[in-house]
Amino acid sequence: MLHPYWRYEYITADHKQHNPKLFSELPQKTDEEAHILRRNPHSYLTLNAFPYTAGHLLAIPYREVGRLSDLSNEERADLFNLVAYAEDLLTQALHPDGFNVGMNLGLHAGAGFPNHLHVHIVPRWANDHNFMPVISGTHMLHAAVHTLWEQLKKHVATLDH
């Protein structure tokens, strides 16, 4: 049996005990500690700690809300401008062939944090549908999260200037 080691902590966690305020607490840490790549006025961009693929990012509003309609127009625009920025960043740094961008709104829609919406930006590559995800639920990750954060952070500097 193959096992995606980077998701082990998530898979074995007692999800009744997970920190529902995690997304509110991450911005209080340093960028390096929280793997934050960019901070906008109303939202921030971070690497997913339990990625599906290398470069799986999360765009998260600072304000804790569970529905898009609960964000102000300004907050919603800021969040989706950050999603577009993430697309540019990942394109420049990792050269994916496409993206899955999405949200799970509500507990029964699969939201791990139903009271703090966030957008998943998942880079995809041609032929990345191999037997491993289908047969064993294993996804290939080619770099540790912190190593990938360091690589992407270099590209943030070029995009921001």
Image (cartoon, grey):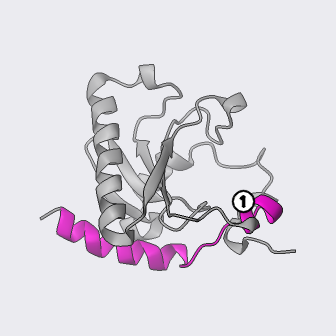
Which residues make up the magenta segment?
Answer: 132-159
| Residue 22 visible from this viewpoint | yes
In percent of width and height, residue 46 lies at 43, 58
- Quick check: 101 above or below 54? above
List x then y, in percent, for residue 83: 36, 46
Q: Give neighbour class at mark 1: few <14, some 14-19, many 20+ (Cα, 10 Å).
A: few
In the picture of the structure, the residue carrying the numbered disc 1 is 10
Percent of width and height locating residue 103: 53, 37
> Does the image show residue 120?
no
Q: Nearer the viewer, residue 71 or 127?
A: 127
Question: Is residue 66 found left or right of 159 in the rendered image?
Answer: right
Considering only vertical position in the picture, is 27 above or below 79? Answer: below
Q: Left or right of 77: which side holds 33? A: right
Residue found farthest to the front: 127
**Dot 1: element:** helix
**Viewer-nearest residue: 142 or 148:** 142
Is residue 52 shown in magenta? Answer: no
x%, y% of residue 64? 48, 34
Q: Residue at x 57, y 65 (%)?
A: 127
Between residue 28 and residue 3, name the one nearer to us.
3
**29 above or below 101?**
below
Asked if residue 151 lies in the magenta stretch, the reply is yes
Please, what is the three-letter code of the amino acid marked with disc 1? Tyr
Q: Quadrant of the N terminus?
A: bottom right
The picture quadrant where one finds residue 21 is top right
Q: Quick check: 54 above or below 77?
A: below
Q: Residue at x 36, y 50 (%)?
A: 44
What residue is drawn where x is 39% and y is 41%?
62
Which residue occupies 31% across, 47% down?
Answer: 84
- Please name the predominant secondary structure of the magenta segment in the image: helix
